[in-house]
């Protein structure tokens, strides 16, 4: 027994298991336990019982289900847990991710042992996993009241209160803030020297006490330097620097961040998280070239950098080169699928989602395929896939939300509303379910209800799609300023994802549309100036700013904007000839050229129009041709040389 404890202390678990199993299998030890246990009353430190507990932990860690079940049966027979083995059975069920079974076992265990702090603690964990937040908190509170000096229970209570407050977001009350902070402080007092707990506390207080959190992060990195501590310090310092208004203080925080990331990479030059975090630091500082240099030898990090930067074609290019050599690599296929989703490439979505399932036929990948189909409008395909999924996984509760989403896409709004409500009954903290119900209410013109649902979804997970849907709901409810505020906060946030391409459903394009509809011309001018400052190489945004200038009669400004767009388009183009057309519609470079010539025509600069036209027409132009060249008709094909 003592030898087993020795091996366990030094993490030689195989050797420890061998020694504990000798005790577990020993009839002599078992008989001695039976004789003594009835005389020990509540003192549960008999050697046989200790060996059983240690061996059970090792079996669960190694996923040795056969040994675990054998131990559960012994515990039941000997009533080691004093609830007929239900506590141990619940532990085994949790390890197998059979949480409903675990909950039932714990309910029975606590019925037999109503004063069992670790039983309540374990049930708190299970309820948290099942999305039963209120029950989880109540169980953790009960466990702490029964055993107020147990450090593990104190950590569980601190964590569940932290998760509750995090989900509540701005809706958290002052009493809830005080309760959670007190729980954290109590947990740290009961677990002195627990650096992970101190790190968690820093995470908890960072939204309201950034300076204190930064001091804790610096202390952790100084006393226990590690890649994780360095990265967390660097991320916090970066966030604070981006929000800082004092220039000197801002640079000092950026210096702390850069130094932290460099320390992390020095500890492990190949650590993906450290490299990715340092690259994100460069992106947020507008140091794109440094980020690309950092990721030059790592295609996985490079495509992700491009993806976060909104440079989807660059991301696709990196992935497609990678795909040529490693088509069987699931990370490559997942990347191509994500790019296809963001660019609404339906054909590519179907192709890569099927390839991903061939590589990893998992429940999550099936769900992601159906979600992606619904998101980009492959409704019939989603319906077929969902039916097949339900037949294969009849007990998968996440399918209910997909049914609701499908019903919404097919116009069955009442049914969609009922299904989302049912889904929320089983998990009231499902951000996606609140978002779908908000979108259903929006389509049913229940705009106030839609706003409530979407705000709840945003508080749980502030995804861009949710915030854009919320802005649309505000707009329809005639709350224009709320819509503008929501979109501006998305766009202006220092760490917001970029949106270089003005996609129809994007936050930047939607804000532009609202400004246009409301006639907010000054706001729109500032919007274009800020957008061009953020995306100085975007031909598309220069074109849109140029079109607005023409509409306002500012032809010289339009000439300048379209001229810059045309020059930028030439730099990015592989040929330096005339701009190409797409089957009756203009590409961004061609639109820039036509807009440039139109601005010249409208400002009366006909000689300059002819000068530009001669460069791309096979003979000298005459004034009879300039209107064709200028492309005043935005969808006209450039005339061929005669």
Image (cartoon, helix red, strand yellow):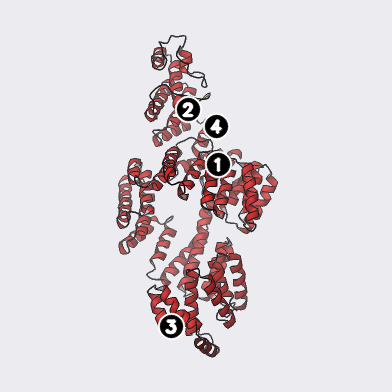
For the residues marked 4 and 3, what is the alpha-carbon distance in whole angstroms?
A: 79 Å
Return the disc, 1 or 2, that comes first in the chain's sequence: 1
Instruction: Return the x and y of residue 91 as percentages of the image width and height.
Output: 54, 71
For label 2, the crowd category at 10 Å Cα-Cα, with few meaning under 14, some 14 to 19 and many 20 or more, is some
**Sooner in the amino-acid sequence: mark 1 or mark 3:** 3
Q: Observer-nearest residue: 133 or 639?
A: 639
| Mark 1 and mark 4: Cα distance apart in space | 15 Å
Q: CA distance from mark 1 to mark 3?
A: 65 Å
404 displayed left or right of 206 = right
Marks 1 & 2, CB-CB < 8 Å contact: no
Asked whether disc 2 touches disc 4, contact meaning CB atoms under 8 Å apart, the reply is no
Camera-near label (2 vs 4) is 2
Q: Residues within 10 Å of mark 4 (few under 14, many from 20)?
A: few
Give the mark toward the camera: 4 or 3: 3
- Crowdedness of circle 3 by 10 Å Cα count: few (<14), some, many (20+)? some
- Label whose residue precedes the other's in the sequence (2 or 3): 3
Q: Secondary structure at mark 4?
A: helix
Disc number for residue 471: 1
Give the SS element for disc 2.
loop
Disc 4 + disc 3, Cβ < 8 Å? no
Using the numbered discs, state the Cα–Cα distance from disc 1 to disc 2 in whole angstroms: 29 Å
Residue at mark 2 to residue at mark 4: CA–CA distance: 28 Å
**Residue at numbered disc 3:** 1
Q: Which residue is mark 4?
A: 518
């Amino acid at each position: 027994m003592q030898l087993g404890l020795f091996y366990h202390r030094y993490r030689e678990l195989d050797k420890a298991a061998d020694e504990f199993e000798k005790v577990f299998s020993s009839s002599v030890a078992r008989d001695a336990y039976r004789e003594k246990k009835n005389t020990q009353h509540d003192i549960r430190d008999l050697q046989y019982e200790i060996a059983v507990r240690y061996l059970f932990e090792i079996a669960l860690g190694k996923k040795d289900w056969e040994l675990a079940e054998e131990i559960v049966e012994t515990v039941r027979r000997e009533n080691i847990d004093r609830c007929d083995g239900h506590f141990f059975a619940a532990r085994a069920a949790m390890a197998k991710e059979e949480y409903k079974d675990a909950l039932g076992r714990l309910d029975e265990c606590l019925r037999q042992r109503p004063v069992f702090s670790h039983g309540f603690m374990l049930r708190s964990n299970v309820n948290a996993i099942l999305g039963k937040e209120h029950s989880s908190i109540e169980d953790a509170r009960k466990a702490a009241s029964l055993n107020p000096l147990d450090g593990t229970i104190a950590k569980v209570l601190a964590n569940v209160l932290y998760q509750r407050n995090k989900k509540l977001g701005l809706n958290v009350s002052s009493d809830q803030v005080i309760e959670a902070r007190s729980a954290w402080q109590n947990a740290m007092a009961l677990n002195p020297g627990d650096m992970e707990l101190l790190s968690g506390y820093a995470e908890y207080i960072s939204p309201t006490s950034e300076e204190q959190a930064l001091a804790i992060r610096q202390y952790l990195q100084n006393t226990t330097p590690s890649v994780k501590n360095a990265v967390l310090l660097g991320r916090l310092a970066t966030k604070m620097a981006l929000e800082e208004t004092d220039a000197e203080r801002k640079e000092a925080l950026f210096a702390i961040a850069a130094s932290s990331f460099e320390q992390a990479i020095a500890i492990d030059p190949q650590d993906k998280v450290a490299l990715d975090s340092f690259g994100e630091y460069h992106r947020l500082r507008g140091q794109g070239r440094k980020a690309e240099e950092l990721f030059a030898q790592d295609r996985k990090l490079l495509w992700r950098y491009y993806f976060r930067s909104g440079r989807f074609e660059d991301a696709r290019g990196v992935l497609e080169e990678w795909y040529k050599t490693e088509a069987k690599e699931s990370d490559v296929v997942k990347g191509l699928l994500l790019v296809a989703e963001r660019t609404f490439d339906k054909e590519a979505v179907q192709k890569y989602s099927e390839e991903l399932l061939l590589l990893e036929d998992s429940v999550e990948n099936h769900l992601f395929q159906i979600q992606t189909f619904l998101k980009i409008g492959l409704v019939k395909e989603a319906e077929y896939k969902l039916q097949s999924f339900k037949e294969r996984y009849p007990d998968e509760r996440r399918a209910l939300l997909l049914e609701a989403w499908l019903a919404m896409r097919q116009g069955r709004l009442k049914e969609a509303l009922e299904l989302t409500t049912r889904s929320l009954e089983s998990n009231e903290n499902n951000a996606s379910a609140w978002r779908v119900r908000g979108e259903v209410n929006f389509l049913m013109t229940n705009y106030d209800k839609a706003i409530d649902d979407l705000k709840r979804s945003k508080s749980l997970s502030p995804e861009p799609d949710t915030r854009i849907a919320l802005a649309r709901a505000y707009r329809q409810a005639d709350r224009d300023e709320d819509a503008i505020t929501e979109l501006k906060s998305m766009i202006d946030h220092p760490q917001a994802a970029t949106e270089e391409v003005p996609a129809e459903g994007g936050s930047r394009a939607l804000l532009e549309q609202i400004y246009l509809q409301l006639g907010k011309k000054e706001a729109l001018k500032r919007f274009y100036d800020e957008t061009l400052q953020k995306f100085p190489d975007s031909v598309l945004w220069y074109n849109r700013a140029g079109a607005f200038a023409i509409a306002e009669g500012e032809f010289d400004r339009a000439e300048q904007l379209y001229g810059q767009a045309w020059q930028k388009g030439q730099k990015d183009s592989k040929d330096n000839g005339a701009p190409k057309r797409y089957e009756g519609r203009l590409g961004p470079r061609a639109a820039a050229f036509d807009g440039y010539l139109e601005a010249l025509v409208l400002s009366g600069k006909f000689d300059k129009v002819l000068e530009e036209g001669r460069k791309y027409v096979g003979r000298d132009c005459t004034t009879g041709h300039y209107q064709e060249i200028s492309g005043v008709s935005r969808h006209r094909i450039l005339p061929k040389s005669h």
